[in-house]
Image: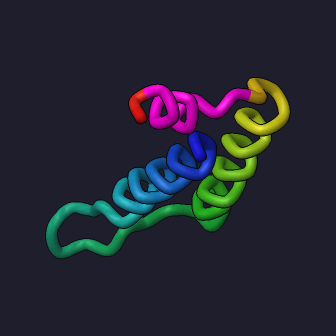
Amino acid sequence: MTATTLSIIYSIVLYYFLTKAPPGEAPDHPLWVFSLMPAGVVVILFFFKYIIKKDFLRDFFDKNE
């Protein structure tokens, strides 16, 4: 749950920065910049599922019930 939530937040923030441009101009980025979104999501999911192996949000919500 934590990895998925952080991946969604990462995608939204990166999308905002990739589409942000001065008024009247189109965003000008090389094509490799757009590969950062799926690569970042994969890194976040891998890090939380296989390295940390702890779901912080699930523990937090289970504790409050």
Q: Position of residue 10 (x, y in %)?
A: 49, 48
Q: What residue do we see at 30% from left, 61% from top?
A: 20
Q: Position of residue 2 (x, y in %)?
A: 57, 40
Q: Is residue 19 left or right of residue 9?
A: left
Asked if residue 58 is among those painted magenta in the image, a careful observer would answer yes
Residue in the foreground of this view, choosing between 33 and 30? 33
Q: Position of residue 54 (x, y in %)?
A: 70, 28
Residue in the foreground of this view, choosing between 16 and 27? 16
Q: Which residues are magenta?
A: 54-63
Q: Is residue 42 left or right of residue 10?
A: right
Q: What residue do we see at 63% from left, 67% from top?
A: 31
Q: What residue do we see at 27% from left, 62% from top?
A: 21
Asked if residue 13 is among those painted magenta in the image, a careful observer would answer no
Above or below, 47 against 42 in this view is above
Q: Is residue 31 left or right of residue 5?
A: right
Magenta stretch: dominant SS? helix
Q: Looking at the image, how many numbered discs can be counted on the residues?
A: 0
Quadrant in which the C terminus is drawn = top left
Residue at the front extreme, as displayed: 65
Q: What residue do we see at 50% from left, 56% from top?
A: 8
Above or below, 22 against 10 in this view is below
Residue in the foreground of this view, choosing between 19 and 42? 42
Q: How is the image coloured?
A: rainbow
